[in-house]
Amino acid sequence: MTDATLTEAADTLLAAYDTRVPVEPLVDKYPGLTLADAYEIQLVQIRRRVEAGARIKGHKVGLSSPAMQRQMGVGQPDYGHLLDDMFWLENAPVPASRFLQPRVEPEIAFVLKKSLTGPGVTVAEAAAAVDFVLPALELIDSRIRDWRIGIIDTIADNASSGGVVLGSTPARLTDVDLRLAGCTLHRNGDLVGTGASGAVLGSPLTSLVWLANTVGTRGVVLEAGHVVLPGSITASVPVAAGDTVTAAYAGLGSVTARFTEETS
Amino acid sequence: MTWDLDRAATALLEAEDTRTDRGPITDEWPELDLDMAYAVQDETLQRRLNRGEHIVGVKLGLTSRAKQERMGIAAPLTAWLTDAMLLPAGAPVPQDRLIHPRAEPEIVFVMKDRLAGPGVTAATALAAVGSVHGGIEVIDSRYRDFRFTLPDVAADNASSGRFVTGPVGVPPEKLDLAIEACLVEVDGQVADSATGAAVQGHPAEALALAANELGRRGLAIEPGWLVLTGGMTDAVHVPPGTTVAVHFTHLGSLHLTGG
């Protein structure tokens, strides 16, 4: 694809954030898009946002658990960028109308104390680079109509990122069972999902390694202080204004997100 | 020939013994209701006992939302476990005895006290439990493609096949079973995961439900019995050459091969 085409596709997605009207899948209009094209479309948007004053605060891995891969019909993981304006405070209202078709996912977030430069990052190096973990709820969203995403469209659309709510109970890596800790997801008091933390590629650490090595091939470094969301433990669930969602993790506490109408 | 309890019990045990799947009984006998279905189930138990099997406990079926959605049936049910269904640790799935086996992770109780409904609550049920184990149930329906209604599956002993119990027994008061997790791997690849909350909100709720359902029929859960509380995740296929591993947070790991 030409640069002009990639820029046009990026503009289409950026406009959807503003209008909050989803667009048709990019692959319908640009059938020749490759994975590399899709990541470039994502990067054009991120560069544009950074030029406008946004700051990169980390990355997310998407589609890394069987539950999510089944739900979205996409069989491989991808990654996106987390910008500072995507972070919402626990228990503070999140205006649902800022999003197009939001869904939530329970995740165990990593906070890095050392940078990770792939390719070639091992599990040992990744574990040594983690400062602490936090309970998290990721808010995913799609600028593509009705979540009709394949791998190309979700990558181009910043891996269907929306926002993130971090909990307030940091834990050391050595104090959490990253593989077999249980997780429950409740929406308005109803149990809507359960899982084990290892649902994410066998361990969220594997996801962190995958991310470091995948972005590394594109010259991107995971920075100290950054947040990494490794992927959802359960299938995602839709949310709307009025909903309250809580994810609880064995040994790691819980995190709650509250969705409201727009407040002035 | 008209359908009755005797004919239904014979048809189901024959399907099991000859490894021949069949259509739902309700296709031919639409009057089969849940009470009659349990009478058929009890009749098949009696015939199992007559041929030398022994009751070792009860199981629950369709207790998780994943299973209920998959089967399109929104009510849990109980069924009988005999020693002939017990698979020793390390034994492969006996493919030559089963029709279309699938494996699912379960939380298993070994009962310390007798539990007789009605009126049993999750808390009183849990107080009657001696130890908690991980387990894998190998379900196997006598119905083609697992296609059945609630009375069909109740009559078919809730798709019982085989079961294996895990190596670790933990007193119930040492565990938060709502958040006790299992991770299911097929041939080393993560296939699914869940916690005990997926089973009726808490496996003790499933146990109370079983005690109350049996109590309705004048039966009780006896000391020393096993109770399989129901699949935590959707069931996975275990064809020959496959290995299913289930890892629990505190209840150890189990491995099951398809032979």
Image (cartoon, coloured by chain):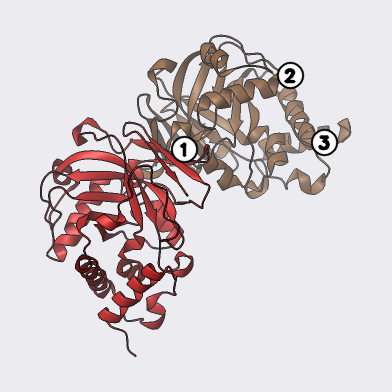
Chain colours: A brown, B red
Host chain of mark 3:
A
Going 51% across and 35% down the picture, which residue do you hit?
A232
- Which mark's residue is nearer the viewer, 3 or 1? 3
Between B107 and B149, which is closer to the camera in this rendering? Answer: B107
- Report x, y in % for residue B169: 24, 35
Give the structural element (helix, strand or loop) at label 1: strand
- Which mark's residue is nearer the viewer, 1 or 2? 2
- Report x, y in % for residue B83: 25, 55
Image side of residue A37 versus residue B75, left or right? right
What residue is pinned by disc 2? A51
Q: Which mark is residue A8?
A: 3
Residues under labels 3 and 1: Cα distance? 33 Å
Host chain of mark 2:
A
- Report x, y in % for residue B105: 38, 45
Q: Which mark is residue A260?
A: 1
Residues under labels 1 and 2: Cα distance? 30 Å
Q: Are marks 3 and 1 on the same chain?
A: yes
The amino acid sitting under disc 1 is Thr
The amino acid sitting under disc 2 is Glu
Q: Which comes sooner in the sequence, label 3 or label 2? A: 3
Residue B147 drawn above or below residue A70: below
Between A206 and B143, which is closer to the camera in this rendering? Answer: B143
Between B207 and A239, which is closer to the camera in this rendering? Answer: B207
Contact? badges 3 and 2 (CB < 8 Å): no
Going 38% across and 24% down the picture, which residue do you hit?
A252
Work out which quarter of the rendered image holds the N terminus of chain A and state it.
top right
